[in-house]
Amino acid sequence: MIEINNLSKSYCKKPALINASMNLTPGKIIGLLGPNGSGKTTLLRILTGELRADSGNITIDGEPLSTNTKARISGLTNTDFMPQGMTIDQAAATYDLFFPDFDRSQFHSLLADMDLAESLQISSLSKGMKSQFALALAISRRARLIVLDEPLDGVDPVAREEILDLIAKGFREDCTILITSHLIHEMERLLDEVYFILEGEVQAMGDVESIRENRNISLDELYREVYRK
Amino acid sequence: MKALLTFEYKKIFRQNRWTMLTLLGVTLLFLISGTISLNNLDSSATRALLQFTAFSVIGLAAVLTFTLFAPVINAIQNYHRDLNDQHAVFETYIPENGWKRLAAKYITYYTQIQAGVLLVELAFSLVISILITFTRFSPQPLDMGEFPRMIEMVQFMWGKDPVFSILSLLYYTVTLALSLTSATLFINFFITLHSVLRHRLKAATPLTFLAGAITSIFLGWLNEMWFSNAGSIKYQIVSFGPEAIFNFGVSAIAFYAIGYMLEHKTELK
Amino acid sequence: MYKFQDGIPIYTQISGELKSRVISGQIKPGDKLPSVREIAEEFSVNPNTVQRVFMELEKDGFTYSERGVGTFLKEDGNMVAQLQQQEAEKIRTRFISEAKKLGLSLDKILKDLANHWEQGGTQE
């Protein structure tokens, strides 16, 4: 269980996150949905350690976020995050090196499904391929929390389907997958629970199927409803 | 730790292998051309031969200076990239604490700097010995204001106990490399400070520069105050006395502070 | 990728799709259903959603599960007929309400249907 309590962060006095709270339970795919600039990336980057919160706290299985907890969190906040000049193989080897929970054989099979040769240079991949490869790396870790920031961003519609499939493949009972996206409609089918975010403020919306059942609308429409001025 | 070291070494090697090979090749080239020209140099030397000699000597001096300082610049550049580039993101994912990560980086930086110093000193001693033994010039007291001890050390080699001279050589090589490394530590401290302040203060960049400038002036002043200035700064670098201890102390504090910032305070762009 | 309708729970739609497969004979009584994961991958949905489908199917008495082996469609001869009936009722209800909205009389509809039964319907 990952608890995020009253997390706040500002950039040079400009607030990006305001008292954000979330509860992330294992075995669920959770969406944090909102427009660009609403603070989703900020929240995720605090989870991965790229940024530090100004106030509030995060605990993972009761333990506050620290260097040690990084071993239990697998992130994908930037597609081009590996050092320059590596091949896919070398990237996998690096993951092997640092993360004991990395499942090399799963990574192999995911890559085989994508028809990507492991000897390829990462820099030679197309944007869609890069996103898929990066996702495969993140997903192949047996982590408690997998954090995916806009995994569909900049990817063509065909590759998008493949990425959604990939995320579904990464599902595990003891893991939470937290995804942010502004492409609400495409993400809907994957999500168990959803949180909306606008201008740094997070709202829990609950179980997605219940929303469909009780309100008979899509998440897309619900978002518009909630945030209509 | 082993994982971090492998990672850092691979990073440097991937970047620098061509530069290193080129440097080696160019150094050898200039050494050979220098030897040839100096061998043939006498009172009846033609203008062309004199120019060729000058070319070799200057070329060699340029390459050696580059070899000495390039690893230092490289260490600073690499560190800056590690906090600001795209791949900085991956480094934040690594579940190792700030001090360990810093130590791994500094071991690799030191190795590079040491290799550079070693190469320069070897080339330099080679040049001196060529000058002394093979040329028809008598060993003039060349004006080497920058590195007086290096001349002494070469004289040792040809005069005294070889073991002693080799040990002294080693000692000077190591202390020079360590001093250069600690200089990078000083600069990297401020690079780290910048990534702590970047999201908190609008004027983070100019402020860090200012802080850096003020600190270096302050440290220089402390140096002036406490340690009698026996000769040039370079002289102080290659000796072992209270100044060295002071430098070591400052470096140790800087190392700890940087590690602390990496662990708890730094943020990416 | 399977296109879902807005505003209706996904598990309901997957359930419906599986039921049509039973009606059409793609899945026969006694057959083993694909695993939760396989179905999740096929429809590109969350496995929890598929889990819910399976639970509902079992609750409604269409399937049973064997631990460690999988979920099976019950050997019920009536099942196909039952499902067909359920679907037919849904279509009928929808048809009648739409037709009534248009204000058509039963007579006219019956004549219309009789005339167009052979060639009518959408191309599959």
Image: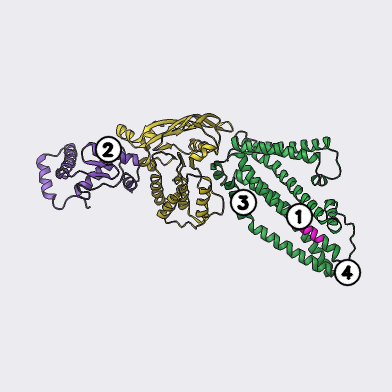
Chain colours: A yellow, B green, C purple
Q: In this view, does A58 lie to the left or right of B135?
A: left
Res A76 label: none
Q: Position of residue B180 (x, y in %)?
A: 73, 47
Give the label, 2 or 4, closer to the camera: 2
Q: What element carries label 1?
A: helix
Residue hosting label 3: B9
Residue at image point 43% right, 30% down: A203
Residue hosting label 4: B42
Mark 4 touches mark 3? (CB < 8 Å): no
**Measured Cα–Cα span from mark 2 to mark 4:** 100 Å
The chain to which mark 1 is attached is B
Which SS does the magenta portion mostly show? helix
Q: In this view, does B197 lie to the left or right of B149?
A: left
- Mark closest to the chain's N terminus, 1 or 3: 3
- Mark closest to the chain's N terminus, 4 or 3: 3
Is disc 2 surrounded by few (<14), some (14 to 19) or many (20+) residues within 10 Å? Answer: some
Amino acid on which the number 3 mark rests in the picture:
Tyr
Q: In which quarter of the image is the C terminus of chain B?
A: top right
Q: Which of A172 and B144 is in front in this view?
A: A172
Residue hosting label 1: B65
Q: Does the magenta stretch include residue B118?
A: yes
The residue stretch that appears in magenta: B117-127
**Measured Cα–Cα span from mark 4 to mark 3:** 48 Å
Residue hosting label 2: C55
Residue at image point 41% right, 53% down: A109
The chain to which mark 3 is attached is B
Q: Position of residue B177 (x, y in %)?
A: 74, 49
**Measured Cα–Cα span from mark 2 to mark 3:** 54 Å
Is disc 3 surrounded by few (<14), some (14 to 19) or many (20+) residues within 10 Å? Answer: some
**Measured Cα–Cα span from mark 1 to mark 4:** 28 Å
Q: Which of A13 and A164 is in front in this view?
A: A164
Is disc 4 surrounded by few (<14), some (14 to 19) or many (20+) residues within 10 Å? Answer: some
